[in-house]
């Protein structure tokens, strides 16, 4: 990478850390460290909510998904604005006004200690794991660029992030998020502009080529429980997932608990609702643009450079033969793509598209053979969706923009991980340490323990990160972890708003919800994970209300 | 002693209903654009 790109990366990271620490005023109390003394304006909280969601996984994994599968993933977010509006008028005033540090703390007031502890434990389990996958994404980029082992890359990202989060608390995290969002949007828009400028065909022709392979199909109205991304899974399953995520997940709840007032907390959530779908569509379109660009500029046969080197070393002759087939087929596909662009009437366009799709299928067969070869040689999963955009950025973008993108990926990762670590520490200290071990200590003691907890969670996330990268598309890994518990935890919060259920109903309902989701996951694995949230939440509410034991039942 | 600057602009205030209306408008425009792309270009 050119030294100017390096300079941009180093200057930005240094600025993030120094500014993060500079913003860490008033963090000498537990409320300042975990809730920024409820002093942050709504737009800072709103950008922080967005930045926590928009991690390096979005920059690498989602753009890669756009290149390989097109726009349909955006349906996943259709439920987000609906969920934000529902939360804005229900749970946000509830939690912000109750004076709690964590969402789970509220559950003890309404139900009992074991319900609080179980939900808090599930949060620690799922978010501890997801903090690892969030760290793995930029680890993959660094590994691809420098040929580092993943362990080194994870350490480069993880160690500074842990130090900065330990010192700065939630205030530093939120202000860092603001700058991160600006950088990410600038980098994304810059890349889209460069893509449009460097594309050998017009934007209209580029869209026709993408459309021929189905990559511009956003809406799928089929009601199919086995299809992951459909309009209905997005609207129904997505709404439940987002309600669970933004309503009950401490990493999000803690964002809006730092707002000055209930109204500012609600507005901060709506700010995220504003931009999520357009921004996600832009990210996916960027991936689609890269796919079209690679119709005219030959990309590597294997995007993972480490796998490419391993296959060349061990199966040199076979891989060379595959490369030769790939190069000649690529030339034919390029010609077919140009024919699609040049077609000037309906009949010739249909014929050109048919020929292009056939050539694209041939390329995919060759890629499949190369990936299988890589899997045999390395013994690892050869899925290389997460390497497509990093390779494109490094080889095709002008000096400066490459550095900006890499800085954006690192900053996105650091800020998201920082938010995760901060909320993991909050839950560990407030819901376990202070609740069960040392309820009467002073603020200074809890502050010290909170900083240790942040460090321990950082170490755990680093270990998970080393293994998460081999699990497949990172974005799906994160969502799968969450969907195991999210729906059931949402069900408990829904029960809390009724007067029909008590502690026993909530606890048994929670176990029943998780059991049902586990049964569906293993018994009917073809059911898409987005529906697990609906199944979990509904089961908890039904079982909880049947068992009852709430105030109303007690009165009767 | 400090005095308030009368020319300073006030901090941005949140307005839940106004924001809600704008959220809906942005979503409708975004979905309409995606729908247009699908209708116009999806083979």
Image (tube, coloured by chain):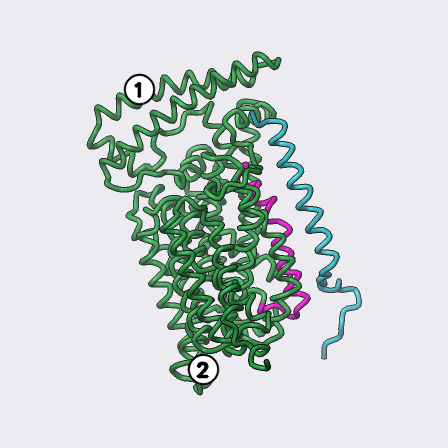
Against A181, residue A189 (above or below) is above
Q: Position of residue A433 (x, y in %)?
A: 40, 78
- Quadrant of res A508: bottom left
> Element at badge 1?
helix
Main SS class of the magenta portion in the image: helix
Q: Nearer the viewer, residue A514 or A65?
A: A514
In the image, which residues are magenta?
Answer: A257-285
Mark 1 vs mark 2, CA separation in Å: 67 Å
Q: In the drawing, what numbered circle is on residue A324?
A: 1
Q: Residue at x 45, y 52 (%)?
A: A479
| Chain for colour cyan | B
Return the x and y of residue A370 as percentages of the image width and height.
30, 29
Q: Colour of chain A?
A: green
Sequence order check, earlier mark of 1 and 2: 1
- The C terminus of chain A lies in which quarter of the figure? bottom right
Tell me the residue at 34%/63% (across/down).
Answer: A459
**Residue A444 circle label:** 2
- In the rendered image of this protein, does residue A11 appear above or below residue A19? above
* Callout 2: SS: helix
State the image coordinates of residue A293 (x, y, percent, origin top left): 49, 28
Q: Is residue A47 left or right of residue A409?
A: right
């Amino acid at each position: 990478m050119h030294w100017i790109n390096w300079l941009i990366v180093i200057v930005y990271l240094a600025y993030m850390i120094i500014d993060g620490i500079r913003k860490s005023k008033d963090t000498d109390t537990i409320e300042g460290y975990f809730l920024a003394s409820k002093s942050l304006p709504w737009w800072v909280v709103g950008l922080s909510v967005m930045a926590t969601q928009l991690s390096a996984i979005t920059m690498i994994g989602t753009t890669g998904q756009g290149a390989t599968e097109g726009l349909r993933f955006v349906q996943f977010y259709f439920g987000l604005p609906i969920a934000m509006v529902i939360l804005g008028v229900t749970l946000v005033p509830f939690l912000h006004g109750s004076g709690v540090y964590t969402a789970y703390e509220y559950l003890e007031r309404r139900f009992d200690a074991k319900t609080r502890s179980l939900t808090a434990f599930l949060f620690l389990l799922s978010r501890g794991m997801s903090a690892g996958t969030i760290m793995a994404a930029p680890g993959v980029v660094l590994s691809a660029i420098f040929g580092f082992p993943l362990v080194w890359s994870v350490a480069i990202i993880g160690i500074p992030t842990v130090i900065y989060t330990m010192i700065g608390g939630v205030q530093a995290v939120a202000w860092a998020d603001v700058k991160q969002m600006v950088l990410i949007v600038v980098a994304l828009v810059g890349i889209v502009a460069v893509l449009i400028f460097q594309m050998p065909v017009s934007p209209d022709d580029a869209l026709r080529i993408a459309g021929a392979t189905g990559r511009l199909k956003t809406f799928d109205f089929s009601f199919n429980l086995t299809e992951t991304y459909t309009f209905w899974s997005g609207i129904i399953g997505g709404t439940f997932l987002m309600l669970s995520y933004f309503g009950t997940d401490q990493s999000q709840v803690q964002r809006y608990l730092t707002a000055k007032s209930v109204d500012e907390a609600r507005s901060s959530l709506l700010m995220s609702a504003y931009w999520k779908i357009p921004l996600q569509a832009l990210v996916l379109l960027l991936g689609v643009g890269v796919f079209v660009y690679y119709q005219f500029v030959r990309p590597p046969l294997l995007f993972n450079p480490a796998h490419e080197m391993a296959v060349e070393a061990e199966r040199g002759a076979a891989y060379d033969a595959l490369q030769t087939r790939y190069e000649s087929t690529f030339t034919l596909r390029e010609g077919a793509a140009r024919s699609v662009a040049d077609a000037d009437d309906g009949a010739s366009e249909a014929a050109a598209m048919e020929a292009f799709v056939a050539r694209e299928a041939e390329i995919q067969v060759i890629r499949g053979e190369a990936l299988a070869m890589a899997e045999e040689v390395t013994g690892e999963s050869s899925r290389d969706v997460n390497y497509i955009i990093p390779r494109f950025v490094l080889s095709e973008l002008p000096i400066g923009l490459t550095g900006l993108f890499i800085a954006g990926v690192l900053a996105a990762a650091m800020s998201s991980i920082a938010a995760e670590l901060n909320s993991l520490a909050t839950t560990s200290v407030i819901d376990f340490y202070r609740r069960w071990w040392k309820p009467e200590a002073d603020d200074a003691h809890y502050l010290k323990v909170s900083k240790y907890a942040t460090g321990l969670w950082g170490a755990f996330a680093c270990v998970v990160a080393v293994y998460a990268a081999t699990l497949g598309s990172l974005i799906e890994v994160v969502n799968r972890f969450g969907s195991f518990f999210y729906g059931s935890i949402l069900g408990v919060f829904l029960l809390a708003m009724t007067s029909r259920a008590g502690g026993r109903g909530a606890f048994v309902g929670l176990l029943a919800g998780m059991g049902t989701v586990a049964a569906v996951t293993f018994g009917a694995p073809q059911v898409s994970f987005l529906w697990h949230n609906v199944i979990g939440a509904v089961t908890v509410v039904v079982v909880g209300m049947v068992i009852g034991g709430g105030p109303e039942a007690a009165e009767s | 002693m400090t005095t308030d600057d009368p020319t300073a602009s006030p901090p941005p205030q949140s307005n839940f209903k106004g924001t809600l209306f704008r959220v809906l408008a942005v979503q409708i425009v975004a979905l309409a654009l995606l729908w247009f792309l699908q209708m116009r270009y999806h083979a």
